[in-house]
Amino acid sequence: IYTATDSLGFIRGKHTITVGGEGTLTKQSINTNGAVSGDFSFGREQTAATQATALNSGNGFASFLLGEMGLAQDYNELIIPRGVTDYGAVYIQDAYKASKTLFFSLGLRWDVYVPSRDANNNDSSNFDATVPNPGAGGILGSMIFSGTGPGRSGVSSRFADTWYKDVAPRFGFTWSPEALQQKTVFRGFYGIQ
């Protein structure tokens, strides 16, 4: 993860203005080679008197000693996916001191989250419930593959468009009335996330 964040603040009269931004580049490798050497299961069934009596007879360790496996699996990945995600944000905030007992905070933030893609530009696949499956007689629900050409969906390897309209306004206030000897503080905040 690579992140750069910076902000700048300055005071103008009763205003304290802060502007800033953030940028993040995330690279994540997902390695799911859980059983490269194999996964072997030995159960009662292989040494039971009959299949019908497998719950009451047989022994998994005896099946192991005889080399009688109930299940053998091997997991191999041809490609180890490496996802890349980008994120950026900018903001401006104004803390305004209306009086010695009343403060307002106004802000605006713009976030841009870019959906992930494979760092090596390998094809990505996804399930789409609206696409007819040719291997199932045209029933809806099929795997789709990114990219262009035969058998490809034509979409980018991100499978989603970047949303550029994530604007989040914020408003807050703090008030400590003099009538209550400034021993009580009222606070309020509203924001869209």
Image (cartoon, rainbow, N blue to C red):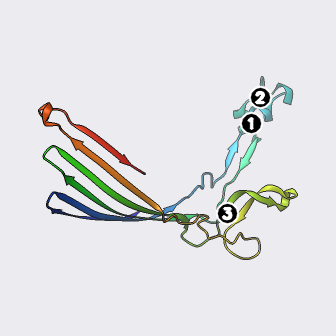
Which element carries disc 2, helix, strand or loop?
loop
Locate residue 136, reporting x and y percent.
Answer: 85, 56
Which element carries disc 3, helix, strand or loop?
strand
Kind of residue at badge 2: Gly
Q: Which residue is mark 2?
A: 58
Near-viewer residue (148 or 64) = 148
Q: Residues within 10 Å of mark 3 (few under 14, many from 20)?
A: some
Please report whichever mark, 2 or 3, sits nearer to the chain's N-terminal start.
2
Q: Is residue 89 left or right of residue 12?
A: right
Q: Is residue 50 above or below residue 97?
A: above
Name the image quarter holding residue 62.
top right
Q: Residues within 10 Å of mark 2 (few under 14, many from 20)?
A: some
Q: Which residue is mark 1?
A: 63
Q: CA distance from mark 3 to mark 1?
A: 40 Å
Locate residue 33, reporting x and y percent.
Answer: 60, 56
Name the image quarter holding residue 126.
bottom right
Kind of residue at badge 1: Ser
Please report whichever mark, 2 or 1, sits nearer to the chain's N-terminal start.
2
Q: Residue at x 80, y 60 (%)?
A: 132
Q: Which residue is mark 3?
A: 125
